[in-house]
Amino acid sequence: MNPSSRKKMWTAVVVSAALMTGAGACGGDGGGEAAGGDKVRITFAYWGSDARQKLTDQVIQKFEEKNPTIDVEGDFSNWDSYYEKIATKVAANDAPDVMSIEIRGLSEYAGRGALADLSGKVPAADLDQQVLTSGQIDGKQYAIPTGVNAFSMIANPSVLEKAKQKLPDDSSWTWDQWIGLAKDISGAGGVTGAEYNPNPAWLQIFAAQRGEKMYDGTKMGVSAETLKAWWSIHQRLIETKGSPDAAKSAEIGATGPEQSLLGTNAGAMGMWWSNQLNALSKSSGQELTLLRMPKAEGASTSGMFLQPAMFYTASAKSEHPAEAAKLIDFLVNDPDAAGILLSDRGLPTNAKVLAAVKDKLPPVDQKTLAFVDQVKSELSPIVAPPKGALQMEDILKRNTEELLFGKVTPDQAAQKFLAEANAAIAG
């Protein structure tokens, strides 16, 4: 997304939608029109890569085979344009019947009345109940988790071996040890030790290790001192050449897993969501390993958390809510759907479905499942962040890059970030 405020973007699309409506552009082009005969057409919006689009096309085809009276139109977007597109459609009363939304956007869209309450409409008894609660706002089930994952360290053992380094003991390693290992790998020549990822998930983990929350109601819970300590990790990685410089890191950060250092075999370690192990492994052609995140000195918790990869939600304005709910039901509760999607949207949260497809999972997905099972007892539950959290990635990335490029001091960056972040989530 453009670094400009999504709050301003929402206002702009509302005005634009009002003008469109006034010109007679009422009603959806796929949100409830008959598809011919007795068929109903619904639209399913999602973001992702070309690989996800192919899998989604397959799962839609399977759903239509089982539900011949329903046609599903896939509405695919890349990540950068997805929320702008959804915001425009929602503001124009033209929302897709089923929408993929990440946890940072849940409060935003539920609070605007854009999402239907799915309580009792999608069978949820076999879903992980703790994960299911993450899709609730004010006691209403606005979202159903697609699957689960954890923000983790991913390493290439063969690269470490060539650099004459060993995989760390991830049950006890620290950020200082990670920086030192990255430095040694880079120093051996050939590849870069690590790539940093200015994802809010990393900051949330680091803050938890220091006894702080990312969000405290409608204000930020992370302190300026923790921000500066977090940024110092980035700075030290660059100074020791454990990671690329600020310009190269920004360039790499604007791409996806396939173009990352890990994905192109140009790096040894990087932070990614556990369900991205598949894409990274395919791109690199290497056998990669999931690791726990390093800890701050003296930390009593890993800070890591189990999070829905994304949610399925239904439009509150859908003309065919029953069909929308049926599609979501299929996606999360049908083994045939899971057999197609595997871990693309996270490992299934339906225990029966996971058991049915477990043996069919390819080795890389088996590895992801084993890792999540191994660390699950150490992971904290996740709750939906406040409205405005969708802006956090842009705000954090912008302020991180300003610091790393030397445009501001750590104190200035921390003050600026907190001011912008608090304004975004103030409500």
Image (cartoon, rainbow, N blue to C red):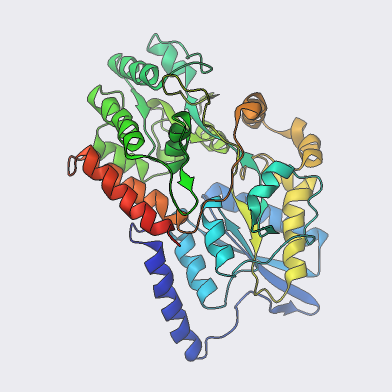
User: In terms of depth relative to the viewer, which is nearer, 319 or 52?
Assistant: 319
Can you say which quadrant of the picture contains the C terminus? bottom left
Q: Residue furthest top?
A: 164
Position of residue 143 relative to residue 151, above or below, is below
User: In terms of depth relative to the viewer, which is nearer, 378 or 94?
Assistant: 378
Q: Is residue 373 left or right of residue 79?
A: right
Q: Is residue 33 left or right of residue 295?
A: right
Q: Position of residue 109 (x, y in %)?
A: 55, 64
At a point 76% along the width and 67% down the height, the residue shown is 323
Can you say which quadrant of the picture contains the N terminus? bottom left
Position of residue 161 relative to residue 418, above or below, is above
Position of residue 175 relative to residue 342, above or below, is above
Q: Is residue 349 visible?
A: no
At a point 42% along the width and 23% down the height, the residue shown is 296
Q: Residue furthest left?
A: 407
Position of residue 55 relative to residue 195, above or below, is below
Q: Is residue 403 left or right of residue 318?
A: left
Q: Position of residue 163 (x, y in %)?
A: 37, 12
Total marks shown come to 0
Q: Is residue 326 visible?
A: yes
Q: Position of residue 311 (x, y in %)?
A: 62, 53
Q: Is residue 197 left or right of residue 353?
A: left
At a point 22% along the width and 44% down the height, the residue shown is 412
Occupied quadrant, residue 277: top right
Q: Position of residue 266 (x, y in %)?
A: 37, 27
Occupied quadrant, residue 165: top left
